[in-house]
Image: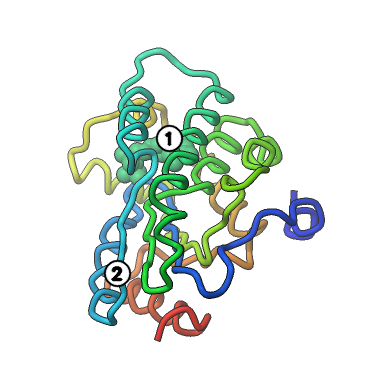
Amino acid sequence: MNAQDFKENYPQFQAPQQGQGLFISFEGIEGSGKSTQIQILSQYLNEQGYQTSVLREPGGTIFGEKLRDAILSSKESLSALAEAHLFASARAQLLHEKIIPKLKDPKNVILLDRYIDSSFAYQGVARGLGINEILRIHHTYPLCLFPHTTFYLAISPEDSLKRQEARGQERDYFESEKFQFTQKLFEGFEKCSEVFNQRIVKIDGNQTREDVSKQIKKTLSNRNLTP
Ligand code: TYD
């Protein structure tokens, strides 16, 4: 799969049309600083008069939070295909309940902590299902709704593990898998940023939070998405 194959074979994957709210997702391996950047951007956009909704995946709805618990606290190993469908199911509900209704108002901005690229990277690449299979699972509306822009905060697998250790984090279902898995995830997100190069903006996550945030705001303004 490359950018050209994607463009030719998957025309249904599109961002919301003009005149609707703004849809932005944040991606990256653990410790990349997504949630900090989401908070900073949310506050900035509120000051500009936008109404932001900060959501996370899996989760964001009552059903989605139940699935989140079921997946992340699972002690048995799930098949990659089962996982991919569970995440897609929580996503479909989030789109139906929260994202699509909010997008009707152009003053609304959805800031989403993980979305479809996490499925490409985790289930598609790291767990080996393939990017095509993830696209296939998402081929009908609304699962084929892409964000206007995705910020991929890139840090190395080594830095990810160091940052997790520094936080003294407990290991959940995914975190208990080893360094090689983080390495594959990193490769997965890098692959996404090549295949979806129009949508994904890769930002060096090792910069200071102020510099990352400046780059995010500048990108939105250069793309004429915000003032
Ligand atoms: P979370 O604690 O929210 O991770 P983080 O703080 O790194 O965002 O847990 C979500 C986990 O679910 C995370 O390990 C990534 C994984 N995931 C997938 O495997 N596929 C998906 O489609 C999504 C949305 C998340």
Residue in the foreground of this view, choosing between 108 and 219: 108
Q: Is residue 180 left or right of residue 196?
A: left
Q: In the picture shown, does residue 170 fall above or below 40?
A: above
The image's colouring method is rainbow
Give how far across and how far down residue 116 sits, in percent.
53, 47
Q: Which residue is mark 2?
A: 51
Sequence-earlier tag: 1 or 2: 2
- Residue 164, image x and y in percent? 27, 43
Mark 2 belongs to which amino acid? Gln
The image shows residue 91, relative to residue 113, as above or below, that is: above
Residue under pointer 1 = 179
Residue 72 is situated, as x and y percent measured from the top left of the image, at: 34, 27
Q: Which of the two marks, 1 or 2, is nearer to us in this view?
A: 2
Which quadrant is the C terminus positioned in?
bottom left
Residue 182 in view, yes or no: no
Q: Is residue 135 left or right of residue 75?
A: right
Q: Is mark 1 within 8 Å of ligand 1?
A: no
**Can see residue 109?**
yes
- Residue most extreme to the top: 76
How many numbered marks, from 0 up?
2
